[in-house]
Image: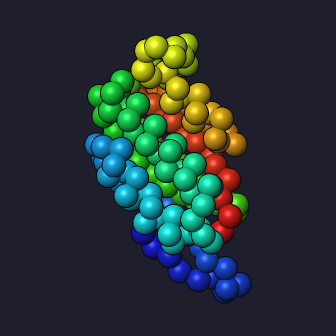
């Protein structure tokens, strides 16, 4: 991760790219380090980012054969989490059932995020979630 000051004394945070964190725990650890460099303080917003990181990486590992690329990028008042995998199948919301586990993650990602996009190409898909984050 590269962090440097611009002429206007604002920090310019370069995106952090990882090729393949194959566990939600590893991705969360990377995200914590990134957030400590770009967020004014830890709190509900950073917790939301960590939850979205966990869900997107877990979904890629469970349903799409694993993560092929992971990126975090800070923007003005936001952070974008992008997870790529080799599947060309878009995430599908599942009906949640109080008796059966699962089915809550995709709904949670959409609820916590200001914007969620799925881009499908010939080699797989990228799921990107933009979340608010005080810098």
The quarter in which the C terminus is drawn is: bottom right
Q: Is residue 114 left or right of residue 2?
A: right
> Where 53 sits versus 65, above or below?
below
Residue 17: tell me if it is visible: no
State the image quarter where residue 24 is shown.
top left
Q: Tell me what residue is drawn at x 62 percent, y 46 percent.
A: 130
Question: Picture coordinates of residue 101 (x, y %)?
Answer: 42, 20
- The image's colour scheme reads rainbow
Q: Tell me what residue is drawn at x 28 percent, y 43 percent.
A: 22
Q: Closer to the camera, 126 or 47?
A: 47
Question: Picture coordinates of residue 68 (x, y %)?
Answer: 33, 40
> Where 20 sits versus 32, above or below?
above
Q: Tell me what residue is drawn at x 33 percent, y 27 percent.
A: 62
> Where 115 sits versus 15, above or below?
above
Question: Picture coordinates of residue 37 (x, y %)?
Answer: 51, 72
Q: Closer to the camera, 132 or 67?
A: 132
Q: Tell me what residue is drawn at x 62 percent, y 55 percent.
A: 44
State the image quarter where residue 86 is shown.
top left
Question: Picture coordinates of residue 20 (x, y %)?
Answer: 30, 46
The count of marks equals 0
The quarter in which the N terminus is drawn is: bottom left
Residue 75: tell me if it is visible: yes
> Where 14 sits versus 62, above or below?
below
């Amino acid at each position: 991760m590269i962090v440097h000051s611009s002429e206007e004394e604002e920090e310019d945070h370069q995106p952090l790219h990882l090729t393949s964190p194959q566990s939600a725990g590893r991705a969360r650890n990377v995200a914590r380090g990134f957030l400590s460099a770009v967020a004014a303080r830890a709190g509900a917003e950073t917790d939301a980012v960590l939850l979205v990181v966990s869900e997107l990486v877990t979904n890629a590992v469970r349903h799409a054969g694993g993560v092929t690329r992971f990126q975090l990028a800070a923007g003005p008042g936001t952070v974008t989490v992008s997870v790529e995998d080799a599947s060309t199948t878009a995430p599908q919301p599942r009906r949640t059932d109080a008796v059966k586990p699962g089915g809550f993650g995709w709904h949670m990602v959409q609820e916590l995020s200001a914007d969620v996009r799925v881009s499908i190409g010939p080699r797989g898909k990228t799921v990107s979630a933009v979340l608010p984050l005080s810098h």
